[in-house]
Image: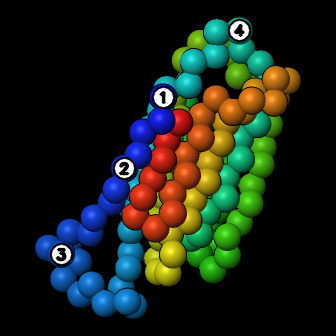
Amino acid sequence: MTSEYQFKPNPSDNPDMSANNQDMTAQYDRLLQSPRGGTYDFTLQAHDLARVLVNGTLLLDNHDAMTSGHLTKQVDLAPGNHHIQLRYHDNEGEATLRFCVGDAMAKTNLLEISQSGSKATIS
């Protein structure tokens, strides 16, 4: 199932909507079900700031606001449910974000979040 979201700035939160003031923050929370457990690939690419937490533990941290960092990490997850949090903040310019969780053995994505500007897609 794929969901699309459109973010619209709230002028009361940011009265100066000029081109130099385009801050945007989003948080995505998902439950990843791993019936058998196994090794998973976590991939994050974001402009500007992004952090990924798994079950409350920081896994990926792209805290360099000036670059579109690309981070990948393999993690062994036990069978069961795992809380995935993606925290994202864009300071200015085009908001771009891509986050994937994939089964390392099957080479398939189980969760993908992408955002371009004010439109986000979750599948």
At horizontal 74% and vertical 29% (from top left) the residue drawn is 108
Residue at image mark 2: 5
Residue at image mark 4: 36
At horizontal 55% and vertical 46% (from top left) the residue drawn is 113
The kind of residue tagged 2 is Tyr
Q: Marks 4 and 1, how far apart in space?
A: 22 Å
Q: State the image quarter where residue 112 is shown.
A: top right
Q: State the image quarter where residue 17 is shown.
A: bottom left
Horizontal side, residue 36 vs residue 50: left or right: right
The one nearer the camera, 11 or 64, is: 11
Label 2: which secondary element: strand
- Would you call the spot at circle 1 few (<14 residues within 10 Å), some (14-19), or many (20 or more)? few
Q: Which numbered mark, 2 or 4, is in the foreground of this view?
A: 2
Label 1: which secondary element: loop
User: Does residue 26 appear in the picture of this structure?
Assistant: yes
Give how far across and how far down residue 70 sits, in percent.
74, 60
